[in-house]
């Protein structure tokens, strides 16, 4: 089927001027002309226009789109499938941003929240960037599923408990408390329980959290989860594991 420039503009929600501009840039050239000399676009042109608009919506500049359009000419179903995947990915990212902004707004609405809202917003933005750096979309989807499963009330309680727990570990470190002590082991047990709750006890996701904490000084500063604190917790966990192994050996 063939379309005039007016028909194509009307059907796809563009202006005739925009189509002329794409033609001038070499992005979309009509495949034919009518006897009267009017531009005619065929099905292949429509597919190319769809790909052009998909690239444009993904944030690419027009000058960067031409090589992509000329490099391949996949079937329509493949183009649509790829576009759907891109849009779904963008929606997931927008939804994460929306949740983060709502959380900041809720904190700002508290009587004591307005004063620190800028710092909280910056910390939230930084955390989002770090999550996207260290976790795949599949990881983030699993974490989001876990959040939904836990529910808002449980999440709020866990988020409130983390700072107090981190502070308690730092306090024992400052006192010089032996990591093998019962007091520190209790803190480690609670730490492990909270982490398992948040990650769904997914070993791969937990390992990525550890890598993120180890590699991000800003996160260490913001959360207080420093390499020294992690080493202290690991020493306590290792001590508990040795004690458990000795107990099992004695029973055998």
Image (cartoon, rainbow, N blue to C red):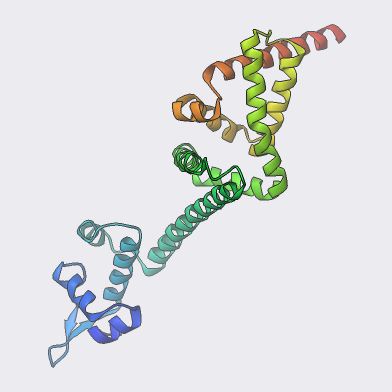
- Quadrant of res 223: top right
Q: How far from the left and from the top, in percent, is residue 215?
A: 45, 26
User: In the image, 252: left or right of 77?
Assistant: right
Query: Which residue is at the front of the view, 107 or 192?
Result: 107
Name the residue rendered at 55%, 43% in the picture.
139
Q: How far from the left and from the top, in percent, is residue 173?
A: 63, 13
Which residue is most to the right? Answer: 251
Vertical order, 229 against 144 (above or below):
above
User: In the image, 245: left or right of 113?
Assistant: right
Which residue is most to the bottom? Answer: 36
Query: Which residue is at the front of the view, 53 or 131?
Result: 131
Vertical order, 95 against 28 (above or below):
above
Name the residue rendered at 45%, 63% in the picture.
84
Q: How far from the left and from the top, in percent, is residue 132?
A: 46, 42
Vertical order, 206 against 175 (above or below):
below
- Quadrant of res 53: bottom left
- Residue 33 visible in the picture: yes
């Amino acid at each position: 089927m063939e379309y005039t420039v007016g028909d194509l503009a009307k059907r796809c929600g563009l202006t005739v001027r925009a189509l002329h501009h794409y033609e001038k840039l070499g992005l979309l050239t009509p495949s034919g002309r009518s006897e009267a000399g009017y531009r005619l676009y065929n099905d292949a042109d429509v597919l190319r226009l769809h790909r052009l608009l998909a690239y444009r919506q993904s944030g690419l500049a027009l000058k960067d789109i031409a090589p992509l359009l000329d490099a391949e000419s996949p079937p329509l179903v493949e183009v649509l499938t790829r576009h759907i995947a891109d849009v779904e990915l963008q929606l997931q990212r927008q939804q994460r941003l929306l949740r983060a902004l709502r959380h900041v707004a809720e904190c700002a609405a508290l009587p004591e929240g307005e004063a620190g809202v800028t710092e909280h917003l910056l910390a939230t933005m930084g955390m989002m960037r770090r999550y996207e750096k260290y976790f795949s979309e599949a990881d983030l989807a699993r974490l989001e599923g876990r959040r939904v499963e836990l529910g808002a009330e449980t999440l709020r309680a866990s988020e409130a408990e983390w700072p107090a727990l981190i502070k308690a570990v730092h306090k024992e470190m400052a006192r010089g408390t032996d990591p093998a002590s019962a007091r520190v082991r209790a803190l480690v047990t609670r730490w492990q329980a909270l982490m398992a709750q948040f990650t769904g006890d997914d070993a791969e996701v937990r390992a990525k959290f550890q890598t993120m904490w180890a590699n991000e000084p800003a996160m260490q500063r913001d959360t207080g989860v420093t390499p020294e604190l992690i080493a202290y917790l690991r020493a306590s966990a290792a001590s508990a594991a040795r004690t458990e192994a000795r107990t099992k050996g004695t029973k055998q």
